[in-house]
Image (spheres, helix red, strand yellow):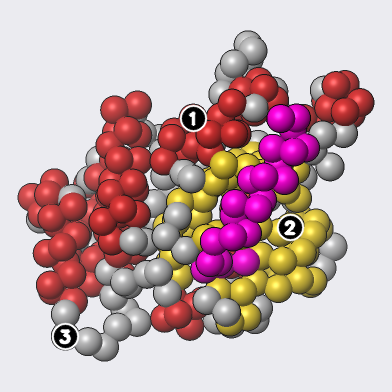
Amino acid sequence: MDATAAAKGARRWVDALPALLEVNNVEVVYSDVILVLRGLSLKVPQGHIVALLGANGAGKSTTLKAISGLLKTEEGEITRGDIIFAGERLNGIDPDRIVRKGIFQVMEGRRIVADMTVHENLRLGAFTRTDGEVQQDIERVYAYFPRLKERTGLAGYLSGGEQQMLAIGRALMARPKLILMDEPSMGLSPLLVREVFGIIRRLNRELGITVLLVEQNARMALSVASYGYVMEQGKIVLDGTAEELANNEDVKEFYLGGHGAERKSFRNLKSYKRRKRWL
């Protein structure tokens, strides 16, 4: 099967699944002049982990912020296209309402509140809830992250791995249907990276939480994902099942280190321009 036929087969696979999230032809502009997303489209099937790969500056974090409604904090806006979650259009909805609808973003760099305790950080994740089961959910978080229960001081004194666990635990407190994860491996040792990705896989399998995962560590991302997209300069240039992407020669070269040093952009490769495989 050639690359074109394989890509069409992968799309039929993802299109056959019920979509929890759809991003349709979205453009994002910052400060009225800087075009970052250029007609980006992707689909996240319910109950799956989907990886979003790309070099620095490709627009991955902007994609997550467009979904979670956080563009306004950085003078960005969606100027074209639609973001559909569980059948409802999210464009223009405030971030707190998006959290209530079932989307929670785990930000790059953790963003825990350093001068609050672990327990207080977890309660902060439940700020949109009015039910009486918050403490029960805190105990569930501790069951997934027993190390956090032992940490009774301020969150700022946690190790990098523990802070990442706390950030994920805080997301769970919102009882999300979809978690947007931005670079969960950043700054962690290889051992902790494996531990965090193991937890992500468990949350997906045991709780059924859908995950859209932005990650520089492509090998780890594809090891837990069922489907993936590759971004270049604000648009999707390749997509397929995780297995197909892991075996793709170009993905190996640029992201998995299969042919020497990683490159920063596909556009610098003559064969990429000649084959025009990804546009």
Where residue 19 sits in the image (x, y, percent)? 55, 66
Alpha carbon distance from label 3 to label 1 = 40 Å
User: Which residue is labeled 3 in the image?
Assistant: 132
Q: Residue furthest front?
A: 1
At 18% from the left edge and 50% from the top edge, which residue is drawn?
A: 145
Does the residue at mark 3 contact the one at mark 1 (Cβ under 8 Å)?
no
99 shown above or below 225: below
Closer to viewer: mark 3 or mark 2: 2
Which amino acid, mark 1? Arg
Quarter of the figure that contains the C terminus: top right
Q: Residue furthest right?
A: 274
Residues rendered magenta in the picture: 1-22
User: Which residue is labeled 2 in the image?
Assistant: 40
Q: Which mark is residue 219?
A: 1
Alpha carbon distance from label 1 to label 2 = 23 Å
Query: Tag 1, which secondary structure?
Result: helix
Q: Nearer the N terminus, badge 1 or badge 2?
A: 2
Q: Crowdedness of circle 3 by 10 Å Cα count: few (<14), some, many (20+)?
A: few
Query: Tag 2, which secondary structure?
Result: strand
Which amino acid, mark 3? Gly
